[in-house]
Image: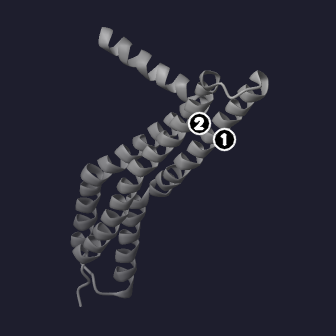
Amino acid sequence: MVIFIELMNSIREFLDTGGQVLTVIAGVICLMWLLIFERLYFFFVGYQKMKKHMMQTWQSRAERSSWNAEQIRIANVSKVTESLNHNVALIQSLVVLCPLLGLLGTVTGMIEVFDVMAISGSGNARSMASGVSKATIPTMAGMVGSLSGVFIVTWLQRKTKRRTEQMEDALPLAH
């Protein structure tokens, strides 16, 4: 329990050091990773169930060579592809949003530095330190969040393409 309280205090101090924009970035990154974990769960569990059901339905069809059968096959592959791509565009948007929010943090932090300089009338390093940390920490957090998401989104897109091709191959037309 003590470790949890210390961890929460450390996180709170870090968020305070980075300013309000860092809290927004943390929320965006949490949402992005929640959606990523949902996609990973679907890829490793839900997709297998869906594929098995589609294959059983296709194999149970008596007729698999007509135009109608081909259209049903195309519709089934499209359903699988749509399910595989679910939320990937939202994850991509959150990946793109992270560095933009980091840039917003940079701007707001620098405004705070300039305010301190205007109020104090000098470039006192101690008085500007808070604004500098509020300018640099959100930028770093936005870039780290974005980079972590870029790799996963690329992997998800590659796997989606591969699994769509596998589904097309798994539902053959009888000629």
Q: Residue at x 59, y 25 (%)?
A: 130
Q: Can you say which quadrant of the picture contains the N terminus?
A: top left
Position of residue 145 in the picture relative to residue 4 (left or right): right
The foreground one among 124 and 167 is: 124
The answer to which image quadrant residue 82 occupies is bottom left
Q: Is residue 59 left or right of residue 66?
A: left
Return the mark for residue 74. Answer: none
According to the image, label 2 marks what residue?
135
Q: Amino acid at mark 2?
A: Ala
Q: Does residue 1 appear in the picture of this structure?
A: no
Hey, what amino acid is under mark 1? Val
The residue labelled by disc 1 is: 107
Q: Is 53 located above or below residue 127 in the figure? A: below
How far across and how far down the image is residue 145, in percent? 44, 44
Q: CA distance from mark 2 to mark 1?
A: 7 Å
Marks 2 and 1 in Cβ contact (< 8 Å): yes
Nearer-the-camera pick, 146 or 78: 146
Q: Residues within 10 Å of mark 1 (few under 14, many from 20)?
A: some
Q: Position of residue 58 (x, y in %)?
A: 26, 71
- Against 77, is 30 above or below? above
Asked if 109 appears above or below 52 in the picture, the reply is: above
Q: How is the image coloured?
A: one colour
